[in-house]
Image (tube, rainbow, N blue to C red):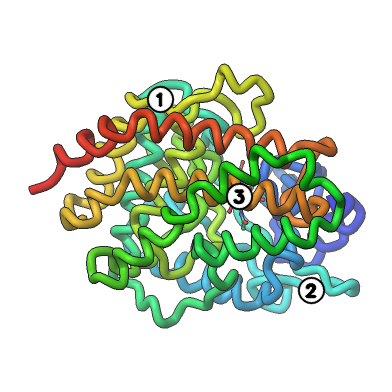
Amino acid sequence: MKNDLNLAVSALNHFQITGTLRGCAPYGNGHINDTFCAFTEDAHSKRRRYILQAINQTVFSRPDKVMENIEGVIEHLHTKTDDPRAVMTLVPTVDGHAFYTDENGGCWRLYDFVEDSLCLERPESNEDFYQSALAFGQFQRDLSDFPAENLNETIPNFHNTPVRYQRFLEAVKADKCGRAKDVADEIRFVTDRADFYSVLLDAHKAGELPLRVSHNDTKINNVLLDADTRSALCVIDLDTIMPGFSVTDFGDSIRFGASTAAEDEKDLSKVWMDLELFKTYTAGFLAGCGGSLPNSEILLLPEGAKMMTIECGMRFLTDYLEGDTYFRIHYPTHNLDRCRTQFKLVADMEEKWDDMKAAVANYCR
Ligand code: ADP
Ligand code: GN1
Ligand code: MG
């Protein structure tokens, strides 16, 4: 973590927090930002928790543009519900701004902690996964009337898989860390599938896959469930909201949540894509979208799942080849282990392809 506790605590003093600061500690399992949970106490010993984040500026070179998107989207989402826990709330700085820039140029933002919520790394039941699907489907539906032209592209070509593939090939060629020789099988896995990478963009060009306002990072740990009812509560991690495809939001959830193992599981015999979870998520996502997805998009949901999984594997492998500068790692081969689980999932999806296609076809009208 680049930002230590001292920096976090001094940043907190620049926000409109209620009560006296009593504690602050690193929090969560995100790969990108530095996240802290802080709590305050008022004169009546009432506690209040906050989520403080330092925006990763290697990943997001224009944090002001990220915050502009988030402010706009949050404001829009608040018009769709009366439940204050259903949408994140930004706490302004003492000057009334959405984020604070410290003396080192670090950018910090503060959210109210969504209390009585659950953040899962894995679904503990099919119902948990269904609820996360409802949340992301509903999220896309709630933003269907948000003016997409107002959004900044915070990471250009974020889910442009052909561009990701070109960057991957460059990383292999440059082989900055001399690691390519050890990952020849993984490199071949990516190059063998080169024809697949343009499938979604081709469908877009053919008019079958419209650009929508999408989340673009739909892991189950980016949605909160209500701790009492375990129902869908609040979508979080809004950094990558940009125009994108419905099927990639669907697909990234499958990649992460329909896997039978963690993203960094070393024992690949434990890793596959659970077809029942795939079906469960399909039902939840389409229900959340309000039955509004046209058949051409429904039919491409399996492609979205495979695309997000191979793309993510490729990104982990690129980062491994480039010396682990993008994703937070906890040990030297962490990105390689993550890449291997993704490729195992892709291979398993290829085995189950006909069943995946048949499962989504059931929803066509
Ligand atoms: P990253 O981009 O690094 O993944 P996230 O925005 O997803 O960062 O936050 C990391 C973790 O912090 C989440 O997985 C969740 O556990 C927790 N979190 C973030 N925002 C909130 C919030 N408003 N209320 C409760 N928990 C939150
Ligand atoms: C990152 O921020 P986090 O941990 O939710 C990444 C996603 C990857 C994911 C892989 C901005 O998500 O694109 O799919 O790791 N976010 C960014 O777990 O690159
Ligand atoms: Mg996250």
Residue name at image x 27 percent, y 47 percent: 288
Q: Which mark is residue 101?
A: 2
Residue name at image x 75 percent, y 37 percent: 334
| Amino acid on which the number 3 mark rests in the picture | Met
Between discs 2 and 1, the one toward the N terminus = 2
| Amino acid on which the number 2 mark rests in the picture | Thr
Q: Can residue 153 be seen from the camera position used here?
A: yes
Cα distance, mark 2 to mark 3? 33 Å
210 or 52: nearer the viewer: 210
Q: Is residue 313 above or below residue 165?
A: above
Between discs 3 and 1, the one toward the N terminus = 1
Between discs 2 and 3, the one toward the N terminus = 2
Estimate the x, y position of residue 285 in percent, counting from the top left: 30, 44
Under circle 3, the secondary element is: helix
- Looking at the image, is mark 2 or mark 1 nearer the viewer? 1
| Amino acid on which the number 1 mark rests in the picture | Asp
Q: Would you say the residues marked 3 and 1 are in contact, meaning their CB atoms lie under 8 Å apart?
A: no
Q: Which image quarter: residue 348?
A: top left
Under circle 2, the secondary element is: strand
Estimate the x, y position of residue 321 in percent, counting from the top left: 77, 51
